[in-house]
Image (cartoon, rainbow, N blue to C red):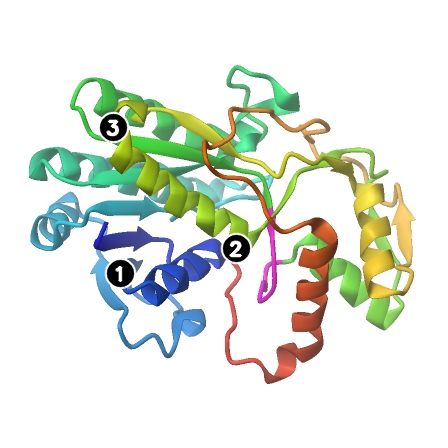
Amino acid sequence: MRKVLVTGASGYIGSFLVRSLLADGLEVIALIRSGTRMTNLEGLVTLRTTEYDGLSSSVLEVIGEEQPDVIFHLAAFGGAADHGFEDLDRIIDANIVLGAQLLEALRQVGNGALINTGTFAQHYEGKAAYDPGSFYAASKQAYEDIVTYYVRVEGVPVVTLKLFDVYGPYDARPKLFTLLRKAQQENVPLAVSPGEQLLDLVYVDDVVQAYRRAARLLEEQPSIAGNVYAVSSGVRRTVRDTVAVFEEVSGKPVPVIWGGRAYRKREIMVPWEGVRLPGWSAEVPLAEGLRRVLNELESRSSSTFESPVH
């Protein structure tokens, strides 16, 4: 693997992946939409970018000209549990159309592999079979079905990684730890659910290594094409227990109102347990990951590396 193309490079996980790949001397091309904020990738002088205009022909042109060994497909939209009518086009475009264009381009070019991104929310309440926890999860499953066609019929090598709750520093998304820290600092009560749902939290650096491991594994063992792997920490904690770890690491209580809001529609109380990616495991324990997050939050005002909401 010498040359790679990354979609979703401007997103939280994508930006960490790009930096990791560049640090190891790989040639990295980011496929981005016009107007995409690239703040978190500033200063990466060796990163090349090419714009995505929504047309299949332009995707084919990029893949044909660049001939990437691997496409890391992280571009997505609409990870929230709820969606509105105005979100439909963007969800389908980002989560299905772009991916299908990439697969067709790989088929026509006849070279290169793709590492796809799925979600544990495709398995409501931890069911082995597909059962969507949200429309976002349904769109991910729709694309996974398209992947199955290209793997089985057209011979395009693809592996899907299903992610759980990814956390880490430099995260501008309104995620649990950012909200807890804000409530802690401002001493403003934070209304949360009753907190009995289980979380599977994976530090962002570990997730990056999962993508890189999947690419190497697919290169070494082409027979795994079509497989789906869980990027799971292997440790599940309730939200209540997770908040307790946060308070212990930060050394200060958080004014949480348990039951201040109801569980979301189709709240996943028990995460899916899929087959773990061979040769990979999460290395950063929650307490250590939280220490890194808190250190970054303390110095965020002076940081030049920011991540947009994605």
Residue 205: which numbered mark, if any?
2
Report the amino acid beneath label 3. Pro
Q: Is residue 148 a member of the stretch shown in magenta? A: no
- At 37% from the left and 39% from the top, the residue drawn is 214
Secondary structure beneath dot 2 equals helix
Q: Is residue 168 a member of the stretch shown in magenta? A: yes
| Gap between marks 3 and 1 measured at Cα | 21 Å
Residue holding disc 1: 26
Report the amino acid beneath label 2. Asp
- At 53% from the left and 43% from the top, the residue drawn is 79
Instruction: Name the outermost residue toward the bottom.
Output: 302
Query: Around disc 1, counting alpha carbons within 10 Å, would you say few (fewer than 14), some (14 to 19), or many (20 or more)?
Result: some
Marks 3 and 2, the one that precedes in the sequence: 2
Q: Are marks 2 and 1 in contact (CB under 8 Å)?
A: no
Residue holding disc 3: 222
| Gap between marks 2 and 1 measured at Cα | 18 Å
Secondary structure beneath dot 3 equals helix
Instruction: Name the outermost residue toward the top.
Output: 129
Q: Is residue 91 above or below residue 138?
A: below
Q: Is residue 77 above or below residue 49?
A: above
Query: In the image shown, does 233 or 192 lie closer to the viewer?
Result: 233
| Gap between marks 3 and 2 measured at Cα | 25 Å
- At 51% from the left and 80% from the top, the residue drawn is 304
Q: State which quadrant residue 88 falls in.
A: top left
The span shown in magenta is 166-173
Residue 145 seen in render: yes
